Every structure is written in C-alpha cells, then in structure tokens.
Amino acid sequence: MFLAVGGDYCSPRGAGSGNLVGVREQTEFAMVAQPEVPSGEPQPFHAVLHPHRSLGRSGFAVLMGVLTIVSIALGTVFLLLGAWPVFGFFGLDVILVYVAFRLSYRSGRLFETVDLVKGRLDIARVHPCGRREVWSLIAHWVRVELKREQSGACDLALASHGTRLSLARFLSAPEKIEFADALSRALAPYRAR
C-alpha cells in the first residue's frame, strides 16, 4: 500500500486540483490542503510506503479464536480416544500460527518515505526495530528504474551517479508500476531544467 501527496498524480481522474492535493490509500481518496508553491517551483511530492497486511487486528483475533476452539475440540476427541500426544500437537499448531502472524505484523511496521522538495529527493527507510536509513539525492540526476521480469514481478530502484537504491520491495508489481510512474512525473520538472 502506498500513500502519496503531490501534484497531478493525486488529482482525482487527472483533474486539476489547484492548491489541493489528493491523498490516495488503496482505493480511498481524500483531499487535503497543500501550501502554496511559488510560481516556477515544481509541486512537492511526498509518499509513504507501507507493506500490505490483509488481516487486521480484529480479524486476527477471530482467526485465533476459531483456530483455538477447533484445536481444543479435535484435541479432546483424540484425547478421549487415547491418543493423548495428538492433543499437544494441536496446541503446538495454534502457538506456531500465532508466532507466525506476530512476526508478519512486526515486519509490517517497516515503512519508507520519499520526499521531493526544492531539488532534493530524500528517502528514509524505517525498520521495525526503529533503525533508520536515510539517503538524499539531487533530483536532477535521479533515474527511476523499473525492471520487469517475465514472471510478472518488478524491481523498482532509483539510480544516481552509479549508485542504485532498491525501493518499495514489499509493494506488489502493479503498485510498483503506479508508484514509479508517479515519481517519474514528479521528477520530470527537475530533469527539464
């Protein structure tokens, strides 16, 4: 999932938006006020990239509840039949599913921000543990590279002066294509100078 603020990219269906810019998250669209930009200055671009998690907290609670009830019920049947070790394995399954989901949610706290303001492209990657990686590039020299594989997968990277920075690894291929297009359009005025 990605959230972006900036220029024509966020206008609903390509319509002009004046000093309003859209905020797009999945299929939702909202308008927010953007500060006036001096004439001749390109519109600032801001995007926050998050991994997609299809199961929310309430869905996770329901899933774990149903899994626990089914495991206890089936485990009890095996326990009454005299196969008491099976009961423990049903409990182990529930614990393993719980741990797997918790690790998945933890990795979902990773996010990346992309800010294009006054000729600088700033990228920050914040890891689940809080470690922060920051890169700052001159917008005029940045190339957006989108490598498409035959399998349908994509690799999105930014290149500048021999340096290549892989970006948005957790987005789906269509999301990477959409983001690459939006970022390329935002960088175009800087490259035209």
Image (tube, rainbow, N blue to C red):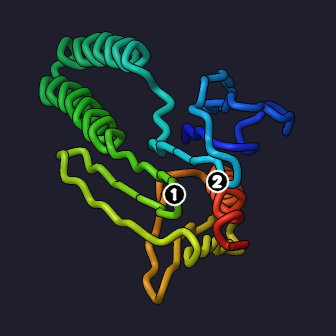
Q: Is residue 173 visible?
A: no
Q: Which mark is residue 118?
A: 1
Identify the secondary structure beneath mark 1. Answer: loop
Asked if residue 140 is positioned above or below residue 110 in the image, the reply reads: below
Where's the C terminus, which quadrant? bottom right
Identify the secondary structure beneath mark 2. Answer: loop
User: Could you tell whether 119 is left or right of 39 in the image?
Assistant: left
Nearer the observer, 151 or 8: 8
User: Could you tell whether 69 is left or right of 79 in the image?
Assistant: right
Q: CA distance from mark 2 to mark 1?
A: 8 Å
Which amino acid, by three-letter code, is at mark 1? Lys
Q: Which mark is residue 134?
A: none
Of labels 2 and 1, earlier in sequence is 2
Q: Residue furthest bottom?
A: 162
Q: Are marks 2 and 1 in contact (CB under 8 Å)?
A: yes
Residue 176 placement (x, y as % from top left): 62, 56
Which residue is located at x 42 percent, y 59 percent? 122
Which residue is located at x 19 percent, y 25 percent? 91
For disc 2, the neighbor class at 10 Å (few under 14, some 14 to 19, many from 20) is: few
Which residue is located at x 56 percent, y 78 percent? 141
Residue marked by disc 2: 41
Which amino acid, by three-letter code, is at mark 2? Glu
For disc 1, the neighbor class at 10 Å (few under 14, some 14 to 19, many from 20) is: few
Q: Is residue 128 visible?
A: yes
